[in-house]
Image: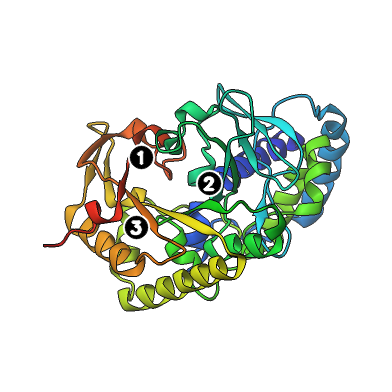
Amino acid sequence: MKPSESFYFFTTFAANNISTADENSAAANSFKTKQLLSGSNFLRLPFGIKNIVLTILICFILFVSKADAKSCLSFLPYGFNKSYVHLPQSASFCVKQGKTIKKYQTDNYGGRLLINGQVLSNKIQVFGDSQVLGLEIENIEKHYLNTLYKKKSLIIYAAPNNGPYQVINFLNSNKKILQKNIIVTFNFSTDIYRVLDYYNPEDFVALKDYELDEILENPFKYRLIIFKNLLFNKNFTLSRYNNKKMQNLFLNSDLDKFYNKLTKYFDELNNTANKLDIKIDFIVTHPYWVYSIDTKNDKLSLNKELNEKVKKLICISFQTTKKISKVLISQVPENLKLNDLTSDRRHLKSSKIKLKNYKEICNFS
């Protein structure tokens, strides 16, 4: 393989991993685990830093002219604006992962449009991260919220690495567009780590929001940005925690600290709702890592003891308020198939998420 082809292949691999696997920013990155690809590692490569720079220049010349904005992207584009993470604004694009192609259409604020009946007159705004964005779906009928909000079109203001406090930032920054009733989601797989003090999306999101339009026009530049971050940003990594490590990470953490951080966040969300005079339906999805993966038998097995700890923490942390009067929590089946996870194995497929009222889940009697 030629040096330019090698670099092209590597950065495509890196872009796909970082775009689709935001979970490692919450667990592996937030806790600064061992980096597989750090700047110092690159400097020790046999062909040296000069050849790396030369390879970049050669690849830029060879491939930049081949980048076609009309073709599907090999990654999901999203950027950070110092306040929250969002998709490209007022854009239409498609993302190809393997043989699967997903189409995206966004509004002026980067909200993904999932239209019911081709009209937006009866819409509801949804806020969160990649779990609610629906990486594996293309139409509203396949989204887990469609069951509860059947006659609504969804506008989903969500992106990978967009944490709970970034959602609050969006609400405060764009209060003029908010409806009186909105949906705020909490992905317990990763958001439990994103409420901690040191979480900063800027450490993990490759693009600035003002770069998104240019990336849509010239996707190859994304690979150069990824490569630069792998070289110089110590928080960037291709490593991922598997389910077992994620389980141990949670079990070895201070659950009282989690409780304090979760209740602090929920209080701030409620205060924001009061200040903006809006009502919130709050939706919590259980973490994918309450399941252990059995690849030999192609199934996921629920770790019941772990799930009870997770459920208890959810139930004691998110109590209903006047402005957050509806709290819904995902149901947890005992057994699932391995393909009930998305291709990155870090999100539960939308079709498998069933929501229950708080009182139905949080019953410890």
Question: Which residue is nearer to you in this view: 222 or 144?
Answer: 144
At label 2, counting other C-alpha atoms closer than 10 Å, the crowd grade (few under 14, some 14-19, many 20 or more) is many
What residue lies at 81% left-to-right and 30% top-to-bottom? 67
Disc 2 is placed on an element classified as helix
* Label total for image: 3
Earlier-in-chain disc, 2 versus 3: 2
Query: What amino acid does circle 3 point to?
Result: Lys
For the residues marked 2 and 1, what is the alpha-carbon distance in whole angstroms? 14 Å
Dot 3 corresponds to which residue? 245
Is 296 positioned to the left or the right of 20 in the image? left
For residue 162, what is the image quadrant?
Answer: bottom right
Q: Is residue 309 visible?
A: yes
- What residue would you read off at disc 2? 130
The residue that label 1 is drawn on is: 353
Is 139 drawn above or below residue 283 in the view shown?
Answer: above
Q: Earlier in the sequence, mark 2 or mark 1?
A: 2
Q: Inspect this view and state whether residue 40 appears.
A: no
* Closest to the observer, 268 or 333: 268
Up the image or down, 308 lies above or below 257; here it is: above
